[in-house]
Amino acid sequence: MSHGLDLDDASGAAGCGAGVAWIRRTLTDMGLLAHDGDVVLVGAELLSNAVRHAGGARHLSLDRHDRFLRIAVSDHDPRPPRMGEHRPDSIGGHGLFLIDRLALRWGSRPAPGGKTVWADLPLPPP
């Protein structure tokens, strides 16, 4: 089952907030609201990274598979994300570290006019 939202180059807090609200509504529609904590956090990090580092988010999607839920954000920057050294004492810069810890796997792939960064989060067995 796949769901998507075009974000029209959403930028700033309003764009991230709209994306997070959509994630919660979509999880409710999928019957997965009980699993929203990590999904919302990872989604918010992907959205904020697109805003902060790639000029805004173009598209947000949630795809349910048998054992995992894939969340993906497309942006305009073709450069793949880089996870730098994690510095727990720094303010900010924890996004990819959190995604790496919460997701089964994550990555990026080229997309027309930019890239898509995705993360797979575990679902309990049916």
Image: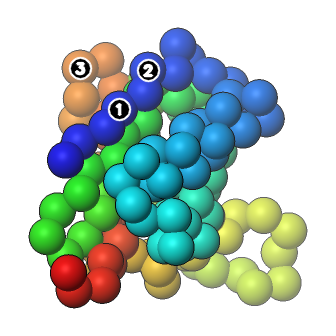
Q: Earlier in the sequence, mark 3 or mark 1?
A: 1
Camera-side residue: 26 or 119?
26
Image quadrant of residue 22?
top right
Secondary structure at numbered mark 1: strand
Q: Which mark is residue 106?
A: none
Camera-side residue: 98 or 54?
98
Q: Residues within 10 Å of mark 1 (few under 14, many from 20)?
A: some
- Marks 1 & 2, CB-CB < 8 Å contact: yes
* Identity of the residue drawn at 22% across and 36% down: 110
Q: Is residue 91 above or below residue 10?
A: below
- Distance (Cα) linking label 1 and label 2: 7 Å
**Which quadrant holds the C terminus?**
bottom left
Q: Earlier in the sequence, mark 2 or mark 3?
A: 2
Mark 2 sits on what residue?
6
Residue 16 in the image, given as x and y percentages of width and height: 67, 38
Mark 1 sits on what residue?
4
* Identity of the residue drawn at 19% across and 47% down: 1
Image quadrant of residue 51?
top right
- Marks 2 & 3, CB-CB < 8 Å contact: no
The type of residue carrying mark 3 is Pro
* Identity of the residue drawn at 52% across and 29% down: 57
Q: Is residue 83 above or below residue 78?
A: below
Residue 81 in the image, given as x and y percentages of width and height: 43, 52
Q: Is residue 85 above or below residue 50?
A: below
